[in-house]
Image: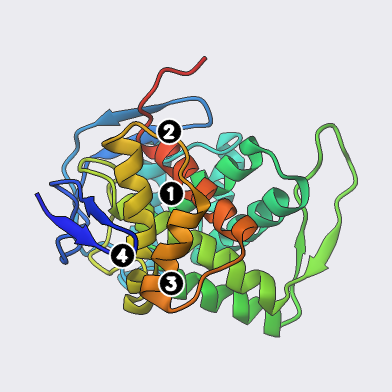
Amino acid sequence: MLTVTSGVSNYQALPTNPVLHGTVSFRASHVICSNKSAVFIPVKSTSNVLNSSFSDKGHTQLQTLHHVASKRWLCRLGDSSSFDDEYRSSRNIAISLLRRYRNAVDRGGGDNLKEFISAGVNAYALGCTDEGLRDELNDMKESGVEIEAMQAYGGTTTLKSKIISEEIDECILWLGIIFITILCTPQPTVVRWSSTPPVSEEILLQWKGFCAVIANAYYIRGMAWLPVKTLQLEQMAVMGCSEEPSVVASRMRLVFSTLEVVSPQWPRV
């Protein structure tokens, strides 16, 4: 069992954790999850199907994979036709993530956050990378594309707004934290149809300790929250500075909520 030493204290890493052992493995089992449940079913993983944001092996292969995946193991979001549209291309995935990010920020609520997390899990499973999706959003921002907001409950008015750089950075950071959290879970968790690392080395180094501390608390100690100061000290040890307590608390909530989506530990009430 590996011990991870940080500026806080010694944390025991999960014995099968590929991130904390220094080598990231992307083979796993598949997860069927929704806002209400997650079920693990062993499957045979396929490597090198997708790379970068998506593979260059052809639109037909992507469509075939998308069709099978959307029917069998992806986190389901809305009705089937809407799901198909949102995951038809890397640009559509980027739009779906940004809309759900805005929804979580503007409206709050655990369900809205888990909608974003579920979209992030699907992006991870389909082989997307944080930088590939960042490029998609930046391209749309430079083109002046306006993104429709998600409709409120029972609402009929749809608002559109342009993309700004700050929300791209924060949306992609949230996505990167979700990806790293998945890598911190014991196998099997979510199958990834690509051998390309989901996050850049820089982001992985910055956030793997933060996510690992929370994952250890979740799996080993059965905790659903940690003192913010503990995570601020972890940030200080890795990055030389720490974020405001409210920001750190929101990052922690994102990690715990991701763990609850991909690897629920307690019965729902």
- Label 1, label 3: how far apart the Cα atoms are: 28 Å
Compute the Cα span from label 3 to label 4.
36 Å
Mark 4 = which residue? 50
Horizontal placement of 13 versus 242: left or right? left
Packing grade of label 1 (10 A; few <14, some 14-19, many >=20) is many
In the rendered structure, are the residues bearing label 1 and label 2 in contact, judged by CB atoms less than 8 Å apart? yes
Q: Could you tell me how far apart the alpha carbons at marks 2 and 3 are, in whole angstroms?
A: 35 Å
Q: Which label was assigned to residue 121?
A: 1
Q: Is residue 204 left or right of residue 151?
A: left
Amino acid at dot 3:
Met
Query: Residue 33 location, x and y as percent?
Result: 43, 33
Task: Give me the residue at 29% from left, 52% from top.
Answer: 184
Identify the amino acid type marked 4.
Answer: Leu
In front: label 1 or label 4: 1
Looking at the image, is 260 positioned above or below residue 118?
above
Return the residue at label 2: 33
Q: From mark 1 to mark 4, how far is it between C-alphas?
A: 15 Å
Q: Name which residue type carries label 2.
A: Cys
Looking at the image, is mark 1 or mark 2 earlier in the sequence? Answer: 2
The residue shown at (72%, 44%) is: 108
Q: Residue at x 60, y 68 (%)?
A: 170
Furthest residue in direction bottom, as rendered: 142
> Element at badge 2?
strand
